[in-house]
Image (tube, rainbow, N blue to C red):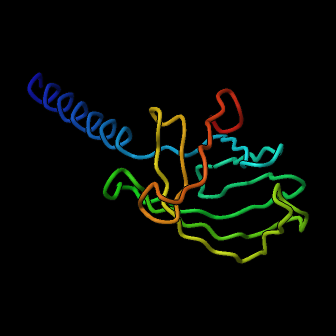
Amino acid sequence: MRTLTTSLLLSLLAVCDMAQAQSTDQPVVTGTWQYRPRGTSCTEQYFFRSDGTVMVTSGREVSESTYTLSSEAMGAGFYKFDTRVTQTNGKSDCRGNQTPVGQQSSTYLRFQANGERIVLCKEASLAACMGPLIRLKGRIGT
């Protein structure tokens, strides 16, 4: 009986260790992030939910999108990040633009500052990026 209990305990610890290792290797984007576009006095907020949806407020615009984030980084720590806009209030964002429903984009996300900042880039390089988005502590989803 003692051997069975010890084996069961060791198996459980191994599973917990594997789960912890996987969770620390995975990027964690859920939570609230803030970004101030250059050349504006406007602030954008991104509310990433664990169900793969994100709500973005930018200027007067409020939009909802679905997103997917690759589970493994490519070279130099970039994660493929795909979005598709599912709804919007049709108002103007911080730059005066309106985001159309159905718009899809593929970018590359890179975490910085121990996961407290992210940049979104057109390619898996820092040559053309937006950001940083800064994680807000104590807000929705954090």
Which of 81 and 120 lies nearest the eye of the viewer? 120
Which residue appears farthest toward the bottom when viewing the image? 102
Measured from the top left, where is residue 32 in percent x and y?
67, 40
Which percent across, then down, holds residue 122?
52, 65
* Residue 16 image offset from top left, x and y in percent: 30, 34
Quarter holding the N terminus is top left
Instruction: Tell whether 134 sits left or right of 88.
Output: left
User: Which residue is pictured at 64% across the width and 49% down the height?
Assistant: 48
Instruction: Choose top left, top right, bottom left or bottom right for residue 98.
Output: bottom right
Residue 14 found in image quarter: top left
Residue at 66% x, 32% y: name it. 136
Q: In this picture, is 95 found above or below 77? A: below
Residue at horizontal 70 percent and vertical 48 percent from the top? 46
Farthest residue, direction left: 3
Placement of 104 over or under 8, stated as above or below: below
Direction from residue 60 to residue 118 in the image, left or right: left
The mark tally for this picture is 0
Q: Is residue 109 above or below residue 9?
A: below
| Residue sitting nearer the eye, 104 or 8 | 104
On screen, residue 140 versus residue 57, left or right, reads left
Which quarter shows the C terminus?
top right
The residue furthest top is 2
Residue 77 % position (x, y):
36, 50
Q: Residue at x 33, y 40 (%)?
A: 19
Q: Quadrant of residue 88?
A: bottom right
